[in-house]
Amino acid sequence: MTALATGDAAPSATALRRRPVLLRLAPAMATYAFVAAVLLAAGTPGTDLLRYTGYAGLAVVLPGTLVWRAVRRRSHTLIEDLAMGAAVGLVLELAGWAGLTAAGLPGWLWLWPLAVLLPFAALPRLRRHWRPRDLVPVPTGWAWSLAAVVAGFTLYLYDSFLRVNPVLPTDEGQAQYIDLAFQLSLAGAATHQAPLDVPQVAGEPLHYHWFGFAHLAAASLVSGVDLPTVFFRLGVPALCALAAVLVAVVGWRVTGRPYAGVVAAALMFTVGEFGFENGVRQLFGTQATFIVWGSPSMTYSWVLLLPLIAVLAEIVGRPRAGAVPPVGPGCWLLAAVFLAASTGAKASSVPVVLAALAFTAAVTLVTRRQLPRAVLVAAGLAVAAQLFATAVLFAFESHGVTVDPFSGLRPYVGEGHSDGVTALLWTGVFVAFLLNLQLRLAGVVALLRLRRWRLEPVQVFLLGGALAGPAIYLLVGHPGSSNQYFTRTGFAFGVLLSAWGYVELLDRAAPTRRARALLGVGAAAFAVLLTAFQLRFPATVPPGRAYAPVLPLLCWAAALLVLVVLVALLWPGLVGRWPGLAGRGGAVLLTAVLVAGAPGLALDAAATRQYPNGGAYPVERMPASRVQAARYVYAHSAPDDVVATNAHCRAVVSGWCDARSFWLSGYSQRSVLVEGWAFAPRMVGLPEGPYAPFWDQARLRANDEAFTAPTAASLAELRDRYGVRWLVVDRQVNPESPDLAELADLRFTNSRIAVYRLR
């Protein structure tokens, strides 16, 4: 990391332009080739990869880049144009999807880019944006370093996600993270609905952040690639690669320093959470960077949040150093557009942005005795966006989020201790939380020290977002630990500011080229050593103690602290032996601190070889027989057909139904009359959890009687009242009545499932 992140003594733009075009494009081409090879190795059909590439390039990046160029004042780099353009393209795609799908024309979605391409081809004033002048070439080291970040994270995705999740299960024992089928069902609904209903309960409005799943649906509709292939192979790696590139270009733009952007990308997509391997996969509600594939809406929200941070930085007031041209007045339009798109991307995005703007206004008022008008207007836009999300998208549903301070930490403290022991445990658990989730932001401390706490307005803004994320996590609670997403949102701010501090500290140290190379090699070696040690000597968590899961982390931190103290004691002697170390101890220390979380991704990937799907929050079996039946329904039904099933429960525990069953709606891409209802917004957060009974017992009774006691009249009511056209029977749950074969047509059967079509 440090070999690339120093004082920005990059070659001049003139020198970079003299390099052959192929040499300048080599990092991008090599990265695409590497990612493509990984996807092909994971079983992605080559034709699907080409179709998806064409979709991404022609239906997202191209129209979005043209609009970005028309809005921003002057060009900067080609990669910034393409990355910011891709984000703009996703927003435009969302608008096109909403309009055409609501009009009942989702099959025409491939035409939406023409609304941009034709005017830019026909109007002379817009035509110039096809080939802008004065693009600044990026430093070669910057490009290859970013390529390494993307390639490394793609390898992580292969080992932790792609390798263990087939597009379609091929055996009866396939384990799958329980949320994936639910998320697939949302994308399936978005192929023909706008706005969405709950796929598991036909007609129930979905008050949820579903914009990311609309993107996956649009990708399938436009590219022609089957939705499960988009979901399980193409969508997540593409969004992660785009997010990594956006971190790099936004970091460059906001700080004025090219390498601050690449360091920020490494902090977000190479360095994982700090901890010690002990089999606890979700300490403080998360596990390494698992969330990028366990919740693709998080990555989608980053792709919109990062450009929003860039344009808000213009409004707040970023430094003019670094020859990065301002966006210009168009930043207000872009801020409004990205705020609007963020409302339904992830519920955590706008609150953190609003808190960051409020923090900026408050600090400015205290330090400068004035209220920044531009910041207040931007905050007003954020308030409007949040009101829209709360009232329209979420219909005032809380989704189980409550004000419950420190609920994410409380389980590790336990009960029944004396006051002194309780205080000690709270202190230890809070320290563990900071180390686990915030250690990669140590560069912020360095920046505060270097600036003597006198931060520029944009740095205050980034600090506000970095603090708001974990602060909201600590303030609110959620039964499924979904409050963790506020921390994840704060990461987007924090890594930018941490990288800024790191690069400034290295600037102050002024290492030679050789010293930078040695520091980089040392950082890599340290990361490998930490990873190897944890893989070789994993800790065990003693049972019966609430605080036991955090003990390995704290002990590991103490051991590393002892190592730091020993090096500090030896440092004068080392400086005497190697004078080049003089004045550079802080840079070495900060490098080690930032790299300390590097084992996170490797350990998370390695866990998939020991635990089902990495030991993530619960898995379920996804038998191939069920998926085959669901895919039959998809292939032979109309998008508006409703399906009924007798399979509602993931499991039945002491007579109570765990209603987290989503396989039929997920793989059939059709609405189900009643499947598993646990994730319906009105059910989330109830005291019974996933075992809460269904709210409409009359509907459930009519559904189940179609299988246990069917009559011509009851089946006709299902067809005419609810739009049911298909009945899917899981015979391991309960065989259907023999009368059903006389009243409906048997269309498909296998060892477990039967599919009937109503007459």
Image (cartoon, rainbow, N blue to C red):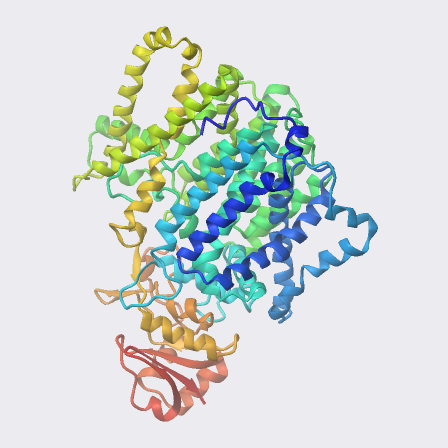
Q: Residue at x 45, y 88 (%)?
A: 716
Whole-percent x and y of residue 560?
A: 29, 24
Residue 44 against residue 277 in the figure, above or below: below
Q: Is residue 297 visible?
A: no
Q: Residue furthest top?
A: 576
Residue 658 against residue 123 in the figure, above or below: below
Q: Is residue 255 visible?
A: yes
> Of residues 326 and 21, which is closer to you in this image?
21
Whole-percent x and y of residue 427?
A: 30, 28
> Of residues 570 and 102, which is closer to you in this image?
570
Image quadrant where one finds the N terminus? top left
Q: Residue furthest bottom?
A: 742
User: Is residue 464 toward the left or the right of residue 61 in the image?
Assistant: left
Whole-percent x and y of residue 492?
A: 50, 38
Residue 358 falls in image quadrant: top right
> Of residues 138 and 585, which is closer to you in this image?
138
Residue 464 against residue 341 in the figure, above or below: above
User: Is residue 436 toward the left or the right of residue 455 in the image?
Assistant: left
> Of residues 635 and 656, which is closer to you in this image?
635
Q: Residue at x 46, y 59 (%)?
A: 231
Whole-percent x and y of residue 681?
A: 44, 59
Q: Residue at x 54, y 33 (%)?
A: 142
User: Is residue 367 toward the left or the right of residue 71 in the image?
Assistant: left
